[in-house]
Amino acid sequence: MNGSRETDSPILLAEAVSKAYGEQLGCVDISFELWPGEVLAIVGESGSGKTTLLNCLSAQLMPDRGSARYHRRNDGLRDIYAMSEAERRFLMRTDWAFVHQNPRDGLRMNVSAGANVGERLMAVGARHYGDIRARAVDWMEKVEVDTSRIDHFPRTFSGGMQQRLQIARNLVTGPRLVFMDEPTGGLDVSVQARLLDLIRGLVTRLQLSVIIVTHDLAVARLLAHRMMVMRDGRVVEQGLTDQVLDDPQHAYTQLLVSSVLQA
């Protein structure tokens, strides 16, 4: 995949983001730039700190120190930790999206598929029922969910279809930055492959900026322009995805790559 820089500023600029849980380190001094239209993969084993970092970057968890500045549409780079709670909530409804590993964490299971997509539109002011339903149908088509099931509850969908519906719910308002936490985790291999193709197509077509957490190096290679490898809360290696995977420099990255090759 080829990145594109639509502006002269990164869409997200993280500097020395750090979080600890008592004596246990979550993430330590993480700094990077994410550019418009770029996909960054954060990889590492369980306990490496990648999910803690993702939660800090998406302001679901407040770091102990450091800053993360987001390039808002109207007033440029703003530190998300200095924003009010209302400002951050507004970002999450509009410019940001978060795709959970378990789609049940990102969907309302007691309302219909169409209502799940429509709710996010209503959260940003949409009120015309016909328009909301039409956009829900459009997005169900985009993520390849049978539109005849628009009035069905998500609990009647397969795991892969639930994940597609969660993606539609997240993208319907046209966010610019998407956080993804192991979006294909727990799915069968064939379902994973189709979902990854869908995600890659949407990211390219919509020019989304994405931060994706994954333990799967194949997912990183398919989706990400750049990657950061984390171990024990620290970034041990980062660079262009193909370069890191084809010529890993750090011993830990070499171990991760060799374990995949031997599998």
Image (cartoon, grey):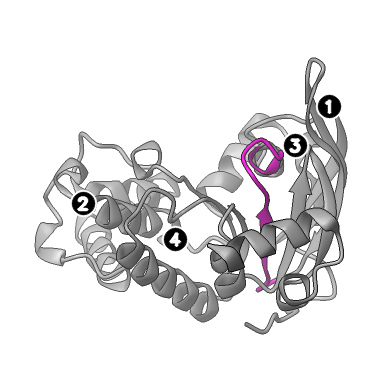
Q: Nearer the viewer, mark 3 or mark 1?
A: 1
Outermost residue to the front:
262
Mark nearer the viewer, 4 or 3: 4
Name the secondary structure under disc 1.
loop
Residue 182 location in percent, x, y? 51, 51
- Judged left or right of residue 51, residue 237 is right
Q: Nearer the viewer, mark 2 or mark 1?
A: 2
Q: Tag on residue 64? A: 1
Residue 259, horizontal then vertical, whole percent? 63, 59
Question: Which amino acid type is marked by label 1?
Answer: Asp
Name the amino acid, label 3: Met
Query: Do tag 4 and tag 1 residues touch (Cβ < 8 Å)?
Result: no
Label 2 to label 3, Cα distance in Å? 38 Å
Q: Residues within 10 Å of mark 4 (few under 14, many from 20)?
A: many
Q: Nearer the viewer, residue 135 or 217?
A: 217
Residue denoted by label 4: 171
Please tell me whether residue 22 is drawn above or below residue 122 in the rendered image. Answer: above
